[in-house]
Image (tube, rainbow, N blue to C red):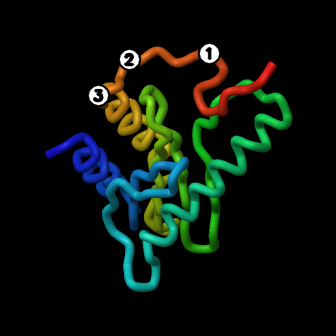
Amino acid sequence: MNNIDRSLDMAANIKGAFAVAIVDFDSGMTLGSRGGSPEFDLDVAAPGNSEVVRTKLEVMQKLGLRENIEDILITLDSQYHLIRIIRGTDEQLFFYLVLNRAQANLAMARRDLRVIEQQFAMTSPQAGAPQQQGQAFFPAQQR
C-alpha cells in the first residue's frame, strides 16, 4: 500500500467522513479518492476545489500576506468541506475531506486530518526537502 492509499484510508475513517481525495492544486488532478456517491461526484468536486486554493493563494499574494494556508472550511447545510494543504513536500497537494455535519465533530476532524497530513509529508519521497521561507506556496516573485 502506498502513501496516498494509506492516507486516504485513514482520512476515510474520520468520524462523519463521506468522501476524501488528495488533489494536485496546480493541475487539478485527483491523485486518489475514497467515497462519494452518484449525487456527489468526487471526480468533479475535488479538482474543482483546486480553483478555491489557487484563488486564495493569489489573493494572499496580492495582499502581501507571507503566511501559509492551514486549511479552508466550506460549511453547507448538511456538510463540511475541509481543504487541508499538504506541507513538507515539493508537490502542491491538498486533502479534500467532505464530512456529514450530523455525524462529524469538526474540531476532531481537523485535528485528525492535520495528523494524517503530517504523516503523509513525513513519509513522502520529498520529505525534508528544504523550502524557501515565505515562498512555500507562492510562485516566484520578481523583485
Contact between marks 3 and 1 (CB within 8 A): the answer is: no
Which mark is first along the chain, 1 or 3? 3
- The residue sitting at the right extreme is 63
Q: Secondary structure at mark 2?
A: loop
User: In the picture shown, does residue 47 fall above or below 1?
Assistant: below
Q: Quadrant of residue 2?
A: top left
Q: Amino acid at mark 3?
A: Pro
- The Cα atoms of the two marked residues, 2 and 1, are separated by 14 Å
Percent x, y for residue 42? 43, 70
Q: Which residue is mark 2?
A: 128
Depth check, front residue: 89 or 39: 89
Q: Residue at x 30, y 51 (%)?
A: 8
**Residue 60 on image: x %, y %:** 77, 37
Q: Secondary structure at mark 3?
A: loop
Alpha carbon distance from label 3 to label 2: 9 Å
Secondary structure under the numbered disc 1 in the rendered image:
loop
Residue 58 appears left or right of 101: right
Residue type beneath disc 1? Gln
Where is mark 3, residue-wise? 125
Residue found at x 49% / y 44%? 110
Quickly name the residue at label 1.
133
Residue drawn at (35%, 54%) of the image: 31
- Residue at point 50%, 40% (across, down): 92
